[in-house]
Image (spheres, rainbow, N blue to C red):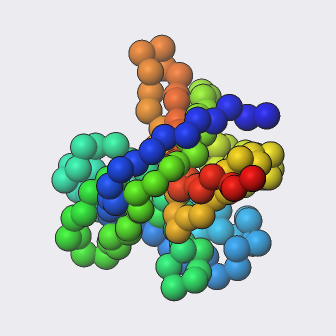
C-alpha cells in the first residue's frame, strides 16, 4: 500500500488558481491535453509567475469541483484578486497526505494523482475522500530530486 499520513487543518483556507473545466472526466487524454495547454498558456503569458509572486512562490496543481464539473488548474495558497483566476475554498478538517518522489518535476504531481485515484483511495478503508478539492505541490531537494505531496480532505469512516 502507498504511504500516507493524516494531518488536521484547523481553519478553512483559500487557493487562487487558473484552470480549465473538464467536460468528460473519463477523457484522460483529452483532459491531460487541455490541462497542459492551460499550463503552457499561463506560463507563456506570465500570469502564473505573477500569481506566484503574490504568494509564497509555491505552485500547486489543484483538482476541484466547480458547479458539479471537474476542474483542474494551477495556483497558489491564499486569496488574490487576479483577472481570470478563481478563488477556491478548502475546508478545515482531516487531510490524507500522500507523498511521492521522482526525478521529473513536470510529471510528479500527475504521478501522485494517478496513484491516488488509480486505486490507492480504495485501499484506504479508515478514511474516505470528501472533497470538494485536492492539491498537489512539488519541491526540489538539495540533490536535484523532487518531492511532492497531495492533500485530500477526508473523513474518518465510522466502524
Q: Which x, y percent locates residue 90?
A: 41, 62
Q: Which residue sits at x=80%, y=46%? A: 123
Q: Looking at the image, is 70 positioned above or below residue 53?
A: below
Picture coordinates of residue 37, whole percent (x, y): 53, 65
Q: Is residue 6 left or right of residue 86?
A: right
Image coordinates for residue 45, horizontal then vertical, percent: 32, 63
* Residue at image point 71% right, 47% down: 126
Q: Is residue 48 visible?
A: no
Relative placement, left or right, of 44 versus 40 is: left
Compare residues 8 and 97 and report the one nearer the observer. Answer: 8
Please state, as top left, top right, bottom left or bottom right, where the N terminus lies in the image: top right
**In this image, 55 relative to 89: left or right?**
left
Residue nearest the viewer, comparing 47 with 150: 150
What x and y, as percent, mark residue 108?
60, 39
Name the quadrant containing residue 96.
Answer: top right
Q: Residue at x 52, y 48 (%)?
A: 95
- Label count reads 0
Question: Residue 90 or 110: which is nearer the viewer?
Answer: 90
Amino acid at each position: 500500500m502507498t504511504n500516507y499520513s493524516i494531518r488536521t487543518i484547523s481553519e478553512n483556507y483559500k487557493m487562487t488558481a487558473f484552470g480549465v473545466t473538464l467536460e468528460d472526466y473519463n477523457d484522460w487524454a483529452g483532459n491531460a491535453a487541455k490541462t497542459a495547454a492551460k499550463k503552457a498558456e499561463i506560463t507563456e503569458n506570465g500570469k502564473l509567475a505573477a500569481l506566484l509572486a503574490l504568494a509564497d512562490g509555491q505552485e500547486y496543481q489543484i483538482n476541484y469541483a466547480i458547479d458539479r464539473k471537474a476542474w483542474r488548474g494551477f495556483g497558489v495558497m491564499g486569496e488574490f484578486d487576479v483577472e481570470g483566476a478563481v478563488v477556491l475554498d478548502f475546508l478545515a478538517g482531516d487531510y490524507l497526505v500522500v507523498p511521492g518522489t521522482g526525478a521529473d518535476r513536470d510529471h510528479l504531481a500527475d504521478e501522485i494523482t494517478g496513484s491516488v485515484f488509480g486505486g490507492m483511495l480504495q485501499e484506504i478503508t479508515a478514511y474516505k475522500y470528501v472533497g470538494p478539492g485536492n492539491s498537489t505541490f512539488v519541491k526540489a531537494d538539495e540533490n536535484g530530486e523532487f518531492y511532492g505531496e497531495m492533500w485530500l480532505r477526508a473523513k474518518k469512516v465510522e466502524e
